[in-house]
Amino acid sequence: MKIILIVLFIIGSSFIFAFLNNKNSIDVSDKSSSIYEYFAHTIDGEEISFKQYKGKKIIIVNVASKCGYTPQYNELQQLHEQYNDQVEIIGFPSNDFLRQEPGKNSDIKKFCETNYGITFQMFEKIIVKKKKMQHPIYTWLSNEKLNGWNNKAPSWNFCKYLINEKGELFKYYSSSVSPLSEEIINFINN
């Protein structure tokens, strides 16, 4: 009788663990060819479908307020002002790297507007690294089974993911690549 109870406990525990573990996950067996299938919340809490960016290039950047790369906010804003009819600049604050984005969404928004005059779309603070609670957009960006070719999650703040007009992941750039680099400008103009 004890053995039957132990077996039932193990089986039941396995089902509960599997359910809880998959609650916030994405099924990677079904390749998503486009970012347009995803949603995110703006820094003000409004849910936005990425379908609204159809036909436009997108640059997605994980940002932080207390990082050596934080001055790239200036370059991202410059890109937004100069090319906003051709590309959407999207910032996702994250505290994943040495706690360099400790503030709440309201603090982050105020910091960006006050210090850098940010007018491009900022989204709520999320998790971008590969772990259980990674935001679905970053799971898509960093999983080749979903995006078709890339497995690189952000290695630090201010990594850039370039999405073409078809909603396909086009290129990944590390933090050290300037938003005003020749490669990114060429992506926008071609």
Image: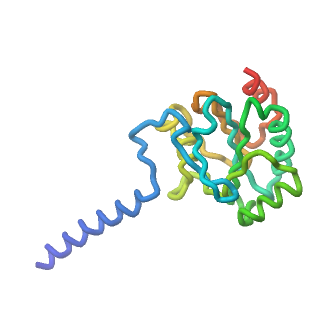
Which image quarter holds the N terminus?
bottom left
Q: Please, is residue 160 above or below residue 14 in the view?
A: above
Identify the residue at image location x=51%, y=32%: 148
Identify the image's colour scheme: rainbow, by chain, secondary structure or one colour.
Answer: rainbow
Residue sitting nearer the eye, 56 or 127: 56
> Could you tell me residue 74's position as x and y percent?
86, 45
> Could you tell me residue 111's position as x and y percent?
83, 59
Q: Residue furthest bottom?
A: 2
| Count of labels in the image | 0
Residue sitting nearer the eye, 51 or 152: 51
Q: Is residue 116 visible?
A: yes
Identify the residue at image location x=82%, y=55%: 112
Identify the residue at image location x=41%, y=46%: 27
In the picture, measured across the screen, residue 81 lies left or right of residue 7, that is right
Q: Please, is residue 176 above or below residue 117 in the view?
A: above
In the picture, measured across the screen, residue 151 lies left or right of residue 88, that is left
The quarter of the picture where residue 77 lies is top right
Residue sitting nearer the eye, 106 or 142: 106
In the picture, measured across the screen, residue 161 lies left or right of residue 3, that is right
> Could you tell me residue 83's position as x and y percent?
80, 32
Q: Please, is residue 175 above or below residue 83 in the view?
A: below
Q: Is residue 96 visible?
A: no
Q: Residue furthest left?
A: 1
Identify the residue at image location x=44%, y=36%: 31
> Could you tell me residue 12's position as x and y percent?
25, 68
